Amino acid sequence: MVEEEKSLNFIEEIIEEDLRSGKHEGRVLTRFPPEPNGYLHIGHAKSICLNFGLAQKYNGKTNLRFDDTNPVTEDVEYVESIKKDIQWLGFEWSEELYTSDYFETLYNYAVDLIKKGLAYVDDSSAEEIAAAKGSPTVPGTPTPYRSRSIEENLQLFEEMRAGNYQDGEKVLRVKVDLENPNMHMRDPIIYRIKHAHHHRTGNQWCIYPMYDFAHGQSDSIEKITHSVCTLEFIPHRPLYDWLIDQLDIYPSKQYEFARLNMNYTVMSKRKLLQLVNEQVVEGWDDPRMPTISGLRRRGYTPESIRNFCERIGIQKRENMIDVSLLEFCIREDLNKSAWRRMAVLDPIKLVISNYPDGQVEELHGENNPEVEGGDGSRTIPFSKELWIERDDFMEDAPKKFFRLGPGLSVRLKHGYIVTCTDFKKDDQGNVTEVYCTYAPNSKSGEDTSGLKVKGTIHWVSVTHAKEAEVRLYERLFSEENPAAAEDFKSSINPDSLSIIEKAYIEPDLENAIPAKGYQFIRLGYFTLDAKNSIAEKLVFNRTVTLKDSWAKEVKKG
């Protein structure tokens, strides 16, 4: 059977037509241009997969260009985190570039526009400029400085560069069209004064280009063939094209696609920074954050995120993606790759009365039964006393409770069938110990007992168990669209993190591999938190539950 060919998205259609027509000399060069003012989030992952994916598909290249034109908010920490995230996702850039590499060239472009009578220095305040621009239905009016001579503008712009003026005292605007219905075309500002230390150029510059001026010109300098942006930049495209035309430079072209909007999440870097600064979360890499570093620390894999981005596709219209799809993608990936291990989070002791005192058996369990041909196995010590989950015992069990209770039988995972004979409570009425007998000839894989049971529970040998801290993460927001609230923090989920300070794990987990996924049998998928773990106390983060329990809670509510 011939596999059906996957349909092209609209950007791929554009590229294939460009290649057929010989446009851009048959080249494909894209770029990913983050501003280093925060950590990348899942929305950036969509853009990364698109830009790098297009280049890979059409034998092209992708530049990583840092849009470092605002020294006040940018930091080397963010630069390094962005590079790490892109590489972790599985992509390599052709060149590492910075808009600051082009500051001199951009300055000269601005001078060229002044010489052509297309740019002028404006002394108006930000409020005065905004008022003079009018509104979408009211034409703008010129400020008194629009008629300055070319010579005066050249001198003033040079003085701005020399540091003769304070922040906000003057700006450079391009002279486009004050009556244009597109507000971005009403003499936009292309340079502003900022006396601030830059993470690369130090104090060399005190004037910085605005995004709308730096973006298209940087694309042109690099000869980017397909400059892919999100939909909010559609109104900016006429200015992008106008500046390239006026400067008569390489004609890069801008194309727009729908950004990623996901429920129960905020994607604004400003809001995410607020969560970090106000210590609502532990940091940018808090496992509840939608940042790539947070998802990585939570146990998400590069494959799951790339698969998620491929599944949601590239659209021309905004839509809301259900976070359950992202959770589905990580479950799907971890089901195929995670090693199975046993852990008990809410323990009570199970004592097998007829099991020989002091005897220890080595049982065997597959690392991952989903892997064809096997993925190895590990030994699991088994003894007379075991930890089991409190939920796996009921004093008065209902008819369809297929776990332990007086007279009920169950299989211990990889081990024997046991039957409950008695239990003990403390003074508060809490069950502390459960007593069972086992059938010696019921061992998994060698069972000749003829006994039939409907339930299987997990366990950890008391003598061999290792203690660990387990962190159970849920969604950070309880409202579907937190960004729409007047105060987005009002919908923070108070139960987004539960910490179990003393869980018991099977001894093999003492050697847990950082960044490796583990399925705690019957409990969910977990990963070692390398940031907070120490040899004496390992910490495991829950990546995701085995099933979408959130949907049930929402329905119940």
Image (tube, rainbow, N blue to C red):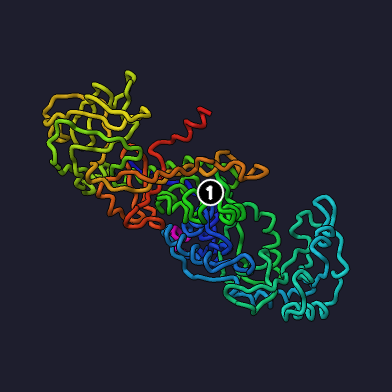
Residue 203 left/right relative to 183 = left
Q: Is residue 418 visible?
A: yes
Displayed quadrant of residue 472: top left
Q: Which residue lies furthest to the front in this view?
A: 427
Residue at 60% in and 77% down:
201
In the picture as drawn, the residue positioned furthest to the right comes out as 144
Residue 506 image point, x, y percent? 26, 45
Q: Does the magenta stretch include residue 57?
A: yes
Residue 335: in magenta span: no
Mark 1 = which residue? Answer: 314
> In the rendered view, would you say 162 is above or below 46?
below
Horizontal side of residue 441 vs 212, given as left or right: left
**Image mark count:** 1
Image x and y of residue 498, in percent:
45, 42
Start-end of magenta stretch: 55-60
Amino acid tagged 1: Ile
Which quadrant of the figure contains the N terminus?
A: top left
Q: Looking at this view, is 211 or 7 the one in front?
A: 211
Does dot 1 land on a helix, a strand or a loop? Answer: loop
In the image, 225 versus 74, the foreground residue is 74
Residue extending furthest top?
A: 399
Q: Mark 1: give few (<14), some (14-19) or many (20+) Cα within 10 Å.
A: many
Point 27% across, 54% down: residue: 511
In the depicted structure, whether residue 215 falls above or below residue 459: below
The location of residue 32, given as percent across then percent down, is 53, 62
Compared with residue 34, is residue 392 higher up or lower down, i.e. above or below? above
Q: Can the viewer see residue 115 in this picture?
A: no
Residue 431, horizontal then vertical, whole percent: 32, 29
Q: Which residue is drawn at 84% across and 60% down?
A: 132
